[in-house]
Amino acid sequence: MSHSFKKHLEDKNNRHVLGISGGKDSAALAIYIKERYPEIHEKMEYFFSDTGAELKEVYEFLDKLEAFLGKEIIRLNSGKSFDDWLKQQNEYLPSPRQRWCTQLMKIKPFEAYVCDDPVVSYIGIRADENREGYISKKETIKPVFPFIEDGLVKADIFSLLEDTIGIPEYYKWRSRSGCYFCFFQRQDEWLGLKRNHPELF
């Protein structure tokens, strides 16, 4: 099987980056790259865009992953809290049409981190998903999808995690990583927050 993303190794000017969200897919991709493609892992820059509103379990999971990878996961942030950004948005909460939180607290810090360098961005979308994820508008950033190319599906991702660092604790009651007060959570996830973190609720 040919892996089109490996051709980017030939250009020595390329930076190779993988954004860790705190969720299962991006963590599994980092593990997969380390185990299957050590030549890419050697060059990889792992990063995490910290909103400051993550669950403590996310930070614990990042520490475990960092130890397994044997490389630092660089912590990025927007320089402001969610409340500061909310004031700047005239108290307009994020919505499915206006996800300003992702744009300002995740994407902008990433684009500032890579500047105008030629970058290969490794994205953990699986072969059994029908979504695009974040694709940068910057021409210098090339997205690649190793799970799609190699045909990995949800069961493979859980196996990768179970065999190495384990599945994040919050998956017992949550379907995603991200801010504990994310407005896209389902009702049962809000109830899970109340049960597991009453002080945050």
Image: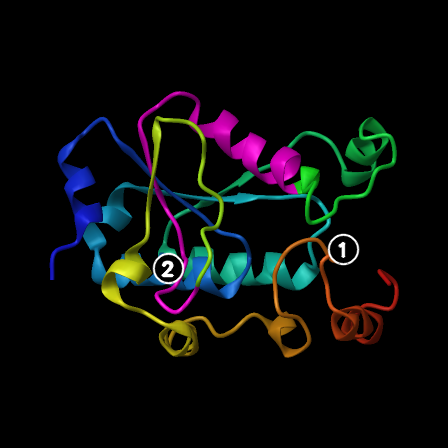
Identity of the amino acid at label 1? Phe
Q: Going 73% across and 49% down the picture, which residue do you hit?
A: 53
Circle 1 residue: 183
Residue 70: mark: none
Residue type for callout 2 = Leu
Q: Please provide percent x and percent y for residue 44.
A: 32, 43
Foreground residue, 189 or 28? 189
Q: Which residue is depicted at the point 38% across and 64% down?
A: 126
Which quadrant is the N terminus positioned in? bottom left
| Residue range corresponding to the magenta coloring | 102-129
Q: In this view, does 201 lie above or below 119?
A: below
Q: Is residue 199 above or below residue 144?
A: below
Q: Residue at x 64, y 78 (%)?
A: 172
Crowding near the residue tagged with mark 1, few <14, some 14–19, many ≥20 C-alpha atoms within 10 Å: few
Q: Distance between the residues labelled 2 and 1?
A: 26 Å
Position of 88 with respect to 120 (left or right) is: right
Whole-percent x, y for residue 173 in the image = 68, 76
Q: Is mark 2 on a helix, strand or loop?
A: helix
Q: Decide whether residue 117 is among the magenta residues.
A: yes
Quadrant location of the C terminus in the rendered image: bottom right
Tell me the quarter of the picture where residue 154 sits.
Answer: bottom left
Seen from the viewer's position, the closer of residues 96 and 24 is: 96
Q: Is residue 51 above or below residue 165?
A: above
**Can you identify the residue that label 2 sits on?**
29
Q: Locate residue 162, reporting x and y percent.
A: 43, 78
Mark 2 or mark 1: which comes first in sequence?
A: 2
